[in-house]
Each structure stands twice: as C-alpha cells, then as structure tokens.
Amino acid sequence: MLILAIDIGNTRIKWGLSNNTNWLDRGAASSNEHAVLAGQWAGIPAPGHIIISSVAHTKKTDQVTRLCQSWPTQLQLITAQATQCGVRNGYDDPTQLGSDRWAALVGARHLFPGRDLLVVQSGTATTIDTLDASGFFPGGLILPGVQLMWQALTQGAAKLGLQQGKFNVYPRNTADAMQSGILNAIAGGIERRFRLLKNNPLCLLSGGDADILLPLLDIPTLDIPIQRVDDLVLEGIILIAQEGSK
C-alpha cells in the first residue's frame, strides 16, 4: 500500500510518497501555494493511506485535506501519544506535544537507536528536544526561529533598522550584530542542551535554517557530533502509519 505522508508547518508543507520501504516521490511548497501542491500531486499514483502532521492553523490544515479528497482513501491526522514506535513521551499531557516534534522523535529513534539524541528542528520556531538511549523523551525547548527573532528586534527597537546582516564573530555594524546575536543565541541553546547528554550523544539538525546554524555547531572546539537529517518528520510519520497498520 502506498502511503502519502504530509508535514504541514507554519510556513512550508512537505510531503513524501512511500511504498513502506522507499520514498517514491517527495516535494514541498509554501503553506499558501496550494495550486503548486495540487500540481505536484497530479502526477503521483493514488495513495492507499494519507497521514498528516500539522502544526498550522486549522484553516491551512483544512485546505490541504480538501486537496486530498480527490483520492477516495483513508486520511489520518496524527497527535502525540504517551508511547508509540518505541518512544515514550514525558510531557505532563502527551497530546500537547506538537505532532511534528513527536514524529521527528520517532524518526530519530528509528534511525539512531540506543543513543542519546538531541533533535533540533530549525524553522519558524526552533525546537530542541532530548531523546535518551532508552527512547524516553523527558522534554524539550521551543525558541523563536531566526526570522522571528529578527522581527522581534526590528519591531521592538525602532533604531536598530530593518537591514538583515551577516554572521560575524566580531560584528562591526548593527545589522551584523543583530544577525550574529540571533544565531549565537540559538546555537548556544543547542550547545547547552547537548551537554546534558551522556550515552554516545549525537545532535540531529533539520529545518529551513539548518544550513546557517550548522557551521556554528560543527567545529572541533565544541566537540558536538552533529548530523544534518532532512525530512525527519516525514520519516517519523511513515513509521507511525506502519505501526498503526499492524
């Protein structure tokens, strides 16, 4: 059976079509580009199961599910569980954990079993989640993403200006000082959480801002084993679908 996995974020929608073993097709679009999404789906075989993680507003989720109605097939919206796919949820109310974070933890556990993991997703928000070697998720952090931090500075301090700068170890202009401060704040949060891990730890980095954060973390003096993993949420969504079909 073909499975269509869909990850609806605040700014982007990612999707992948799987035959339970391999990805047959994958794509992405802006969360407002539903015509683009429909065009991408026009050429794929009809899935037998559609499974969705959404952290977007209900309206955006409804727009995507309406597109899916062209296929007469089962549609499932996932929510975080107390236990699923070998991952145990330490949240006070497990269902309050974002479905994208939950799916990413499931995907991380499957790809790197038996290791302490720091699962970082850097998008509209940056999430920094711990997963221990036994599969237990004790909790995690949510920070504003790069763009949200920049917007907060420009809106809250008028004299800082609107120009986006570049990262510099020792910034010599205001725009660079803002951008460097933002990136250092996020990288510092990641580094601080990583130091809590003990069992052959590994940091997994994904999301739209992963490319600009990676150089700040992947340096010998920090001694942080780090790996870029794209589509970690989609990987987890497929695993959740497979467990549900057993």
Image: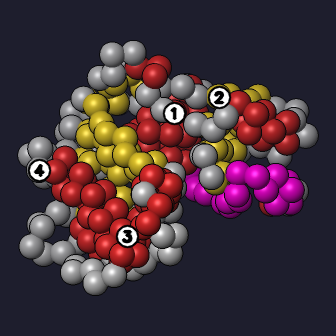
Residue 6: % across, % down: 65, 44
Q: Residue at x 44, y 34 (%)?
A: 102
Asked if residue 23 is among those painted magenta in the image, a careful observer would answer yes
- Marks 2 and 3, how far apart in space? 37 Å
- Marks 4 and 1, how far apart in space? 26 Å
Q: Are dots 1 and 3 in contact, CB under 8 Å?
A: no
Residue 226: % across, % down: 26, 63
The three-letter amino acid code for the residue at tag 4 is Arg
Q: Which residues are magenta?
A: 17-39
Residue 100: % across, % down: 50, 39
Disc 2 or 3, which lies upstream in sequence? 2
With respect to residue 84, does 11 lie above or below? below
Q: Are dots 1 and 2 in contact, CB under 8 Å?
A: yes
Disc on res. 65: none
Q: Quadrant of residue 58?
A: top right
The three-letter amino acid code for the residue at tag 3 is Gln
Disc 1 or 2, which lies upstream in sequence? 2
Q: Are dots 3 and 4 in contact, CB under 8 Å?
A: no
Left or right: 216, with 20 as reference point: left
In this figure, which residue is indicated by the disc labeled 4?
195
Disc 4 or 1, which lies upstream in sequence? 1
Left or right: 168, with 50 as reference point: left
In this figure, which residue is indicated by the disc labeled 3?
179
Label 4's element? loop
Residue 22 in sight from this viewpoint: yes
Residue 115 in sight from this viewpoint: no
Q: Residue at x 69, y 45 (%)?
A: 4
Judge the density around disc 2: few (<14), some (14-19), many (≥20) Cα neighbours within 10 Å.
few
The three-letter amino acid code for the residue at tag 2 is Leu
In depth, the one of 78 and 239 nearer the eye is 78
Q: Which quadrant, please, contains the C terminus? A: top right
